[in-house]
Amino acid sequence: MQASPSFPSEVLVSQGTGKDEEFSEFYTSTWARLFRTTYGVAGDRSLAEDALQSAYAKAYGAWSTVRATDHPEAYVRRMAVNEVLNVFRRPWFRRERPGEPADNLPAPSHEEATLDREALWRAVTALPVRQRAVVVLRYYEDLSEEEIARVLGCSRGTVKSQAFDALRRLRVTDPALDPTGDVS
């Protein structure tokens, strides 16, 4: 089975087996939400597409197991997030990579007193991957600490400490992110 991440409705289905039809419906109904979450964690469209494609491929291979869970979408979300985290753990990823030249960076705009979404997104993507995953899962997906702990395979205390550290970093990056003005 091959699917184009840009066109989720074009899932290629074999000659009408029940498994293929059921998985195709699952894929079509969950792709957009899972892509947004995976993209939020990855911070990169290509990495998100690759991770999600890999998660769906693994889910298809084990569809009877995935389908039998209480929440198949949560199961695949965890697989996709773990795919992203695994990429960041690889030694080749940790090496220095070229970034955008300083000349091409946009100049800060002082036209609006409101929070700039682009600045917020840049600050979130600058977080370490585990902290970024916690922020995306907590504040974008609205998952509880327990649900995040299950997705990331860690304790609830780790989720709390990662969230605390992430929010502290975001407040230091942009004090406008802290309504109390306290950067501690």
Image (spheres, rainbow, N blue to C red):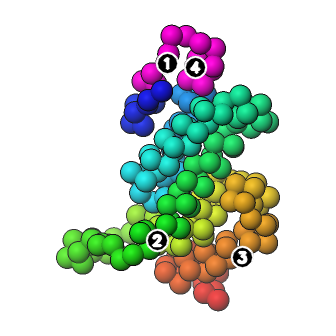
Indicate which label's residue lies in the foreground, 1 or 2: 2
Which residue is more in the foreground, 57 or 136? 57
Q: CA distance from mark 3 to mark 4?
A: 42 Å
Q: CA distance from mark 2 to mark 3?
A: 25 Å
Q: Is residue 22 magenta?
A: yes
Indicate which label's residue lies in the foreground, 2 or 4: 2
Residue on which the image places disc 3: 161
Which residue ends up furthest to the bottom in the rendered image?
184
Residue at 79% x, 72% y: name it.
157
User: In the picture shown, does residue 53 fall above or below 139?
Assistant: above
Residue on which the image places disc 4: 20
User: In the picture shown, does residue 127 fall above or below 9?
Assistant: below
For the C terminus, which image quadrant?
Answer: bottom right
Amino acid on which disc 3 is placed: Ser
Q: Which label's residue is closer to the chain start, 3 or 4?
A: 4
Amino acid on which disc 1 is placed: Val
Which residue ends up furthest to the left in the rendered image?
103
Residue at 63% x, 14% y: name it.
18
Q: CA distance from mark 4 to mark 1?
A: 6 Å
Residue at 58% x, 19% y: name it.
20
Does the residue at mark 4 contact the one at mark 1 (Cβ under 8 Å)? yes
Q: Which mark is residue 91?
A: 2
Q: Is residue 7 left or right of residue 84?
A: left
Residue on which the image places disc 1: 13
